Image (cartoon, rainbow, N blue to C red):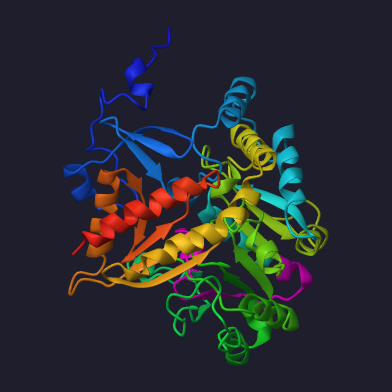
Amino acid sequence: MASQSLPSALLDPASMDGVDLDHFWMPFTNNRFFKQNPRLFVAARDMHYTTADGRQVLDATAGLWCVNAGHGRAAITAAIAEAAATLDFAPTFQLGHPLPFRLASEVARIMPEGLDRVFFTNSGSESADTALKMALAYHHARGDHTRFRLIGRQRGYHGTNFGGLSVGGIGGNRRRFVSQVWGVDHLSHTHGQAVRFQRGMQPGNGGLAEELEELVALHGPETIAAVIVEPVAGSTGVLVPPQGYLQALRDITRKHGILLIFDEVITGFGRLGTATAAEYFGVTPDIITTAKGLTNGTVPMGAVIASRDVHDTVVNGSPEGIEFFHGYTYSGHPVAAAAGLATLQLYREEGLFENAAALAAQWEAAAHSLADCPNVIDIRNLGLVAGIELAPREGKPGARAMEAFHRAFDAGLLIRVTGDIIALSPPLMITAAQIETIFGMLREILLDLA
């Protein structure tokens, strides 16, 4: 029977033919509102999206924290096409193909020294759950069978799978899903004592990291497997850590034999002007989770980078056969691996991490120039990321920022909002002039926002 191809319009993202909004249940979306007021992108190039009605929208959020090299990059597109035409899929359970091995080597090259064992996933959520399972497997291989407890942090975000959801600390993500992983506890978030309108890192730790010692005393160090934190908490609204906080966590975890996991799904691949936040802060964890910028958002892919010690303990300390009973059908998918290789090459060739570092001071100044705008109650920044917090409307939390989001889109600017916080994280190819444009447009929106 001859195959019947789909009409070309159905495969064309720029075509509105055959677009029925009813069937797609959209993620993290007010579906009822969106489907009455659809805002659709149909194309993207470099720093801009194109809308369904042909307008250009300047991307101030790198899509969803992920398009670090900018949109529509020809080298990545070509690598994806070649991989799909050559090897559309190959299993990596007891078999393999060259691309994920090559990509793992390239990822290891830019990780902190000693973190060079790479396990591929398909998303940040899967990376978080994989890292947690690695930590449990590590202690089990060492014979520490009582170490089952996982410590997260309030306002933390580690994806939406049950492991990441459990160690995460954003109430809206958790409260409707009561069946979570047992034996989890949380540190306080880092924003309770924060200085408002602080530029860059907060001035002091304030004893926040030392809360971990209290949890160790409460539960016993012999029960705690791992602590997982975002070096900079992104999805909750850009919470920048205090000076010395991450190093203190590293010291305490090392003292008690607890693994430290950095969730770098957002901060990885140049967001702070370095390959990782671990490099930026000078603190090396035992495991780093990544996704988003790994493939520039073109193909879903994540990676968990473990220390040699974690890897070797699990592999060499397990019985003969499969050492780590975990994986995904698409772990190391050839098309995703090709996208990752092309993306990392583009970062190197164009010096995009260096560009982010060079523009960080201008980004900071431009962000804080909005401090005099109505309803702005705090501004936070680090590298090429910023959070502008707005005063909530009485009885309507989140409404003011969401109105800003819609106004920005209609004016030709893509921002992201979480609660009443505007989060900004542009592609790393951004120019000085585009920084001024972003914050100039945002100023006009805030001045006109009741």
Q: Is residue 148 magenta?
A: yes
119 or 354, nearer to the observer:
354
Quadrant of the image containing the C terminus: bottom left
Mark yes or no: residue 430 visible. Answer: yes
Which corner quadrant holds the N terminus?
top left
On the image, the x and y values in percent for residue 247 come to 68, 77
Of 65 and 354, nearer the camera is: 354
Is residue 162 visible from the viewing direction of this image?
no
User: What residue is rendered at 51% in x and 49% in y?
Assistant: 432
Q: Which of the 4 image quadrants contains residue 205?
A: bottom right
* Residues in magenta, as a range: 138-166
Q: Where 1 falls versus 411 (above or below)?
A: above
Q: Does 344 appear above or below 273?
A: above
How many numbered discs, if any?
Answer: 0
Q: Between residue 441 and residue 328, name the one nearer to us.
A: 441
Q: Is residue 107 left or right of residue 336?
A: right
- Work out whether residue 332 or residue 115 is closer to the camera in this orientation and state it: 115
x 22%, y 63%: residue: 399
Q: Position of residue 370 (x, y in %)?
A: 36, 65
> Residue 17 colored magenta?
no
Is residue 309 shown left or right of residue 79? right
> Could you tell me which residue is drawn at 55 percent across and 32 percent down?
73
What x and y, as percent, mark residue 380? 46, 69
Question: Which residue ends up furthest to the top in the rendered image?
Answer: 2
Q: Where residue 161 appears, x then y in whole percent?
A: 47, 58
Residue 336 found in image quarter: top right
